[in-house]
Amino acid sequence: MSTSIRIRRAWGEEGQALAANTPGMPPNIVLIMTDQQRWDTLGCLGFSHVLTPNLDALAGRGACFTHAFAQGAICTPSRASIVTAEYVHAHGAEQNETWPDASHPNWIAALRDGGYRTVNVGKMHTAPVHLPCGFHERLVVENKNFMQGIMGPPDAYDLYLAERGVTRPALRYFEEVPDWFDRLQAIEWPYDEDWFPDNFIGRETVARLEAHDFSTPLFFWAGFTGPHDPYDIPASVLARYEGVEIPDPVGFPGEAETKPAEHRIGMEKMDGWRMFAAIWWSRATPERIRAMRRHYYANITLVDDWVGRIVATLAQRGQLENTLFVFTSDHGDCLGDHGNVYKFTTHYDSVVRVPFIMAGAGLPPLQRIHGRTLAPLLRGEASHHREIVFSEHLPGRLMARTREWKLVFYPGKPYGELYHLEHDPDELHNLYENADAAPMRRELTDELLQWMVQTRKRG
């Protein structure tokens, strides 16, 4: 995870830093991670159309970052960068259903070897699915549309549903719901709300926090499956969005013709394809797009409810002041921005910019990694973390971004993307071929190539 430019200390004084941990006792660490959550989905950052009171309160105890970026634009590459603290081209897990080998750093294993109890409940997107990855215990819950037998053996959620006589509905909606492709993946959860995957993950997380005796410090990774598609959400949570005004996507007619063909081709390939993850954008209307977004935001609110319960559980156990909380996501979702959905074909901020909150006790940095400590920023000793951040979707797309400019580089291709973010924060106008912007294009390309050389795979 790269953080850049600045942070916002929600409702706190500038001098408030992360709390010191209890003397002599290493802090517990609770990492709460969602799947496919874009950055502009937190109330504490001013986005009041997303209901996140518990995350807002957590940010009020620490720091809510305004500019945090995923190193990979899809699940596994991003998550592997988090675990190894290496860039994608260095750890080598360039696509989903891959994972770095044991020669790469793993701070979870370092915590385990240093005396922590390490536990994961939920999604990590490792390959194999049940890879230990440095944990003493894993209760694996993969994607909503995880296909057992193809992507791996059954996970804990498959077994939970099997006991109730059902299978993952995400794999069946497109066959069983007559108007499925009109819905843009938005539907109410069809079963008991307790069976919803993020409610299963939340309950199992709280149960383990209640059971841990805290004679040893705890590292806990709670990996929620939402708000990743399909945008299926229990009715009771969706009802909380009645009357909430949902913002429309950014974009303009004809924008696709000004951008690399990959953007348009990716959407066209899905249109008419009868499979569980396909969105037929030819069926999109303004109201259907708002419904899609409303369902997406509601899943974030459901996770926010569990954040509140997780924090309350640790408070009840007397561990609140000795716990470092981290909340983030692996990447975002276009949600209709620029006429695109998901994350596979673009590097817009709606894809690579993610929520990032830290609150609680501090930790020393891991050595021999590409990451840098955030401590000076959190202590108020620095105004920004990096001048430039990078992200990848290999083998075909690389991003370099500063506060003012973004370059999306397509290796071996004569085209690309260049945005002057200071004047065009929604990334609408591609300046890659603009003569006046050519010096910045060359400068960012040089920065990108130097970064690739400096951080290439060892050996």
Image: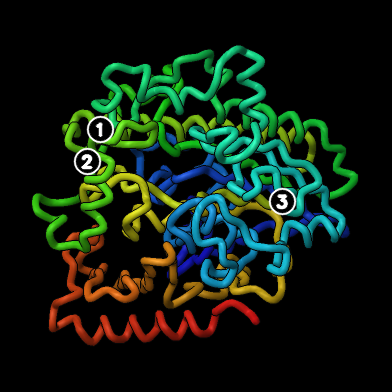
Q: Mark 3 or mark 1, which has the lower sequence index? A: 3
Q: Which residue lies at the image location 42% right of the left edge and 75% below the top edge?
A: 388
Q: Which residue lies at the image location 22% right of the left edge and 76% below the top edge?
A: 414
Q: Horizontal placement of 335 versus 451: left or right?
A: left
Would residue 278 be visible to someone looking at this image? yes
Q: Residues within 10 Å of mark 2 (few under 14, many from 20)?
A: some
Q: Amino acid at mark 1?
A: Arg
Residue 188, percent across and down? 39, 20
Q: Spatial distance from mark 1 to mark 2, Cα to Cα?
A: 7 Å
Task: State the residue position of label 3.
Answer: 29
Task: State the residue position of label 2.
Answer: 248
Q: Residues within 10 Å of mark 3 (few under 14, many from 20)?
A: many
Is residue 203 positioned above or below 430 on the image? above
Q: Amino acid at mark 2?
A: Asp
Dot in front, 3 or 1: 1
Say whether marks 1 and 2 touch (CB < 8 Å). yes
Q: Amino acid at mark 3?
A: Ile
Q: Mark 1 or mark 2, which has the lower sequence index? A: 2
On residue 290, which mark appears?
1
Q: Which residue lies at the image location 39% right of the left edge and 31% below the top edge?
A: 276
On residue 206, which mark appears?
none
Residue 222, percent across and down? 64, 41
Q: Horizontal placement of 181 versus 167: left or right?
A: left
Q: Which residue lies at the image location 21% right of the left edge and 52% below the top edge?
A: 264
Would residue 12 be visible to someone looking at this image? no
Q: Nearer the viewer, residue 77 or 273?
A: 273
